[in-house]
Image (cartoon, rainbow, N blue to C red):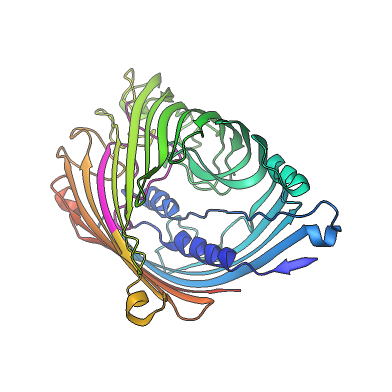
Amino acid sequence: MLKRLSVTWLILGAIGVLSWAAGPAKAQSNGDLIKSLERQMRQYDEVSRQKVSANQPISERLLIDYGGSVRFGFLSVDDEQGHARILRQSDALLYVLAELDGAHRFYGQLRFLYNDFNDGDSFTGDGDEFEDPIADRYWYQFDLRGLHQAQTGEWSDANVNVKVGRQFVQWGAGLALSDVLYAGVFDFELADFGFVGLVGLTPDDDTVDFNASRPEFDENTRRAYYGGMFEYRGLAEHRPYVSFLAQRDHNDNNDVFAPTTRFGYDSEYIGVGSQGAIGPVITYRAELMHESGSTYSDPTRGTPQTRDKVDAWAGVLTLIYALRDANDTRTEFELLGASGDGDRIDGSDTIGGNLTGTDDNAFNSLGYVNTGLALSPDLPNLLMLRFGASTSPAVSLLDNDWLRVGVNGFLFFKTDANAAMSIATDDNKFVGGEVDLLLDYRITSDVTASLRYGVFFPGAAIPETQDNIRQFFYAGVSYAF
């Protein structure tokens, strides 16, 4: 049996664990703090491929890759009053990947995460605890083209790729969905055309919902997803697509404290987009999404609740320019916009949400776009500009890549000055600006230290009672093995 320790996998594991902790800093309530932190907890899976000869014994056709990482991190997150909340995290991750004949892949990942808060600083009020679940990822993938290549050495114009299990799913550019699901993802390809199908369900004990007014929104969320995406794959530099995604709310819709309150939110997302390269140095992604569906109105401003129509939109454009120098210097530009609703008090919640008998124009989803560390607002009614740059200066100075530094600058506006966001604002468009700094220092080949710092400077839209400078700080050390 061939066993090898993949450096790429170890680095990805370490980065994934570190990015998990690089959470957000601010929101309007404890629920918003939890949602903000969750948006920074992202891990992406990648798999490797190996061609094998059909007449080899199984011991030569089976590839096993395994490893893990241990991380210790410290976070300080300011709330809207400028009070810092302190969290220490101990995080261990173990994974194994098995691949047979270049076609059958099995992946499993265990995570042991312990949160240690200062007294009174817990986001949920539960205090110090181990986070569930321990079985963080597990999936099986079959690649028909990989099997054909392994057996014949020839490329096939048609392919069927199926991936089933608990996995991270990003739909298009991530506006409608970017989260962990129990899912089946089915990719069918013929010549220059591809179709991706999705059937999935959120893990009810591990998904932070966008509706923070719903009971148990951070520990009992059940939303089902069904979708299809058509891609044209005949262009060398571009991959355009159209997509449809339906989300159905299977949560308990009744509030135990207010039995007449209902929380149902069903939605459909129709999108067009593309990703690829413009010349040899620029890569991009672009997506425009329309949301339809239905939601329950705010029970505090009209009873009985009505079932109202959702009519919203969102779009994102990201450009990355690689200087192609020895230091791997990159610059980035991102434009994000999402609609808001003028009669909402809160951009995402049911309580304080849509006014009875009116259309709901706020864009809500389990999607993800980087909206910074310190403020980290949700998408509804957000207009954002981001400028970033990163480099490894020690490459040209000392001929090594042990240091990576970067900066991101954000400008936040309201799409509609009179509409609500996920943070408290008044009737002004300019929300504020933010600067985020990053530093990754590779102490040895398998030990990495990371620093993240973000500071938000409030604009005219932030109420005077909450116009404190807000900061986020993270420091962590990770050992990958």
The structure residue drawn at horizontal position 42% and vertical position 50%, both measured from the top left corner, is 39
Q: Examine the image and state in which quarter residue 76 appears.
A: bottom left
**Front residue of this view, candidates 102 and 269:** 102
Residue 479 horizontal side relative to residue 322, left or right? right
**Front residue of this view, candidates 123 and 56:** 56
Residue 259 horizontal side relative to residue 411, left or right? right
Residue 388 horizontal side relative to residue 177, left or right? left
The magenta span reads 361-388
Residue 322 appears anywhere in the view = yes
Magenta stretch: dominant secondary structure: loop
Where, quadrant-wise, is the N terminus in this rendering?
A: bottom right
The structure residue drawn at horizontal position 83% and vertical position 62%, both measured from the top left corner, is 59
Please provide percent x and percent y for residue 332. 30, 53
Please provide percent x and percent y for residue 113. 56, 64
Question: Is 64 colored magenta in this rendering?
Answer: no
Question: Is 375 colored magenta in this rendering?
Answer: yes
Please provide percent x and percent y for residue 133. 62, 55
249 lies above or below 10: above
Residue 129 appears anywhere in the view = no
Q: How many marks?
A: 0
Residue 426 horizontal side relative to residue 246, left or right? left
The structure residue drawn at horizontal position 37% and vertical position 25%, both measured from the top left corner, is 297
**Front residue of this view, candidates 237 and 119:** 237
Q: Examine the image and state in which quarter residue 329 appears.
A: bottom left
Please provide percent x and percent y for residue 302. 33, 22
The structure residue drawn at horizontal position 56% and vertical position 64%, both measured from the top left corner, is 8
Where, quadrant-wise, is the C terminus in this rendering?
A: bottom right
